[in-house]
Image (cartoon, rainbow, N blue to C red):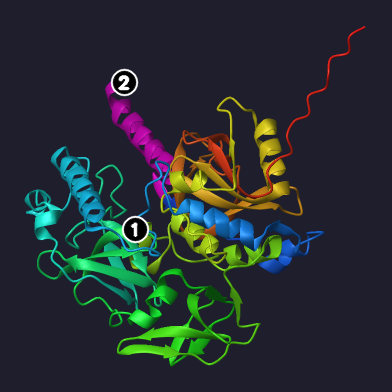
Amino acid sequence: MTRRLAPFVLALATAATADARAACPERAADAALPRRDTAAAWLARLAAPDATLASAATLAAHDERLRRDAEGRPRLGDLGRVAGRDEVVRALDDRLRSFRVALERGVYATARATAVSELRAEAAAALDAGRALRVAVGPVALHCLPFAEPVRAPAEPRFDRNRCGEAGAQDAVEVLGRFGRGLRVARTRFGLGFIADDAPLSPPVPAALEDAWRRGEGVVLQRPSKLGGSALPAGTILKSAGGGAVWLAKARGFVRSRPLRPEEAVPTRRLLTRRAFLTEALRHLGTRYGWGEEGGGRDCSRIVLDVMATFGVAMPRTSASQSAAGLDTVEVPPDADEARRLALLDEAHARGAVLVHFPGHIMLYLGRDRDGVPRALHALADYAAPCPGGGETILEVGRVVVTDLALGGGTSRRSFLERMTRLAVFGRRPAPAISMPLSIP
């Protein structure tokens, strides 16, 4: 009897396992997350949307400080200066060595058979002359390594670790020299890397315009515009040519645009207000996720970099560095409970625009919605969700979304709020605590 029942019991167990997997797959697309958020809806709830969070002068001074790293060294992403050959070579050698070791140890993998031997080359020997400041006239992929083939971590193969970013049309690109066959070393506002020899770039910026492209005043398009025959999206940062006009880079040279109307563009050197911050942040809603801007998308730190650039603040590229780049920084105690974490978030938000960080991710905090739920905008690849019958699944998002901070709760990853470690605040500093004198009888 037992032997007759065994196949039946096994079949039931197999069916139950299959049902459980169907109810809680390892990965699935999130179809329930989209929300219709607009700057107007958020602004309608604010009593003073145009109150100053930080002055233009404060942001400009802070931008100058951010042009150096924690050790006081100039950042390679600062195109306002000419980078020295030695610092470029040193940065490239460090990069190549780090990736070579990761490939040798199996931390990363690539289909390029000669990758390890290529990464043994020393940048000083491979970097030829050919320095020139140019401007992207189309998307320019910046690779971390001197080849275009993807490099992936076997533990998380979706992301190409060889993507260091992408320059968009009208972004300055400083070409530093040729590297091997078909590649150039280049600097952009978000880092150092390798671009294709045939990347869509302008001719070298004329000497008379170089200072304007390196350190000149910028303006931010507030609506899609067609200028000089080029269609440019809202949020594009252009260089002022004076008199309301801007400089436009073309494949064959540079032209001055017609004067822009006040409603078409605003200066990057401006007040940081809640209205301006929410407008620039929510402009990115729905943009596809892309590690290193793969496929024209945006990752979490690039969204922060792009939003803050519209206020003239050149943020560092990584989420960890960005979390320490505010006018004020709030460290979240690891043992803080939910009430304490929310109190820290509310206090920071009352003082200014807030970036919320936990290891590996960063978000732009929007505030509490009409139901009092704290929400943030971020480029989100995926998150973990508990399954009704036990276990958890990874829900894939793959775009810029507005979410609450409870997402991920009840899973091994924990909620965003539970993982929160640091807040970067762009606003006034907290008032110093007042020590009350002891009363001596």
The residue mark sitting in front, 2 or 1, is 1
Q: Mark 1 is on which residue type?
A: Gly
Q: Which of 415 and 99 lies nearest the eye of the viewer? A: 99
Q: Mark 2 is on which residue type?
A: Thr
Quadrant of the frame with the N terminus: top left
Query: Is residue 11 located in the magenta-colored stretch of the structure?
Result: yes
Mark 1 lies on residue: 191
- The answer to whether 129 appears left or right of 228 in the picture is left
Q: Residue furthest front?
A: 208
- The answer to whether 104 appears left or right of 301 in the picture is left
Mark 2 lies on residue: 2
Against 211, is 12 above or below? above
Quarter of the image where one finds residue 53: bottom right
Q: Magenta part of the protein: which range?
A: 3-27
* Secondary structure mostly seen in the magenta stretch: helix
**Residue 380 location in percent, x, y?**
48, 54
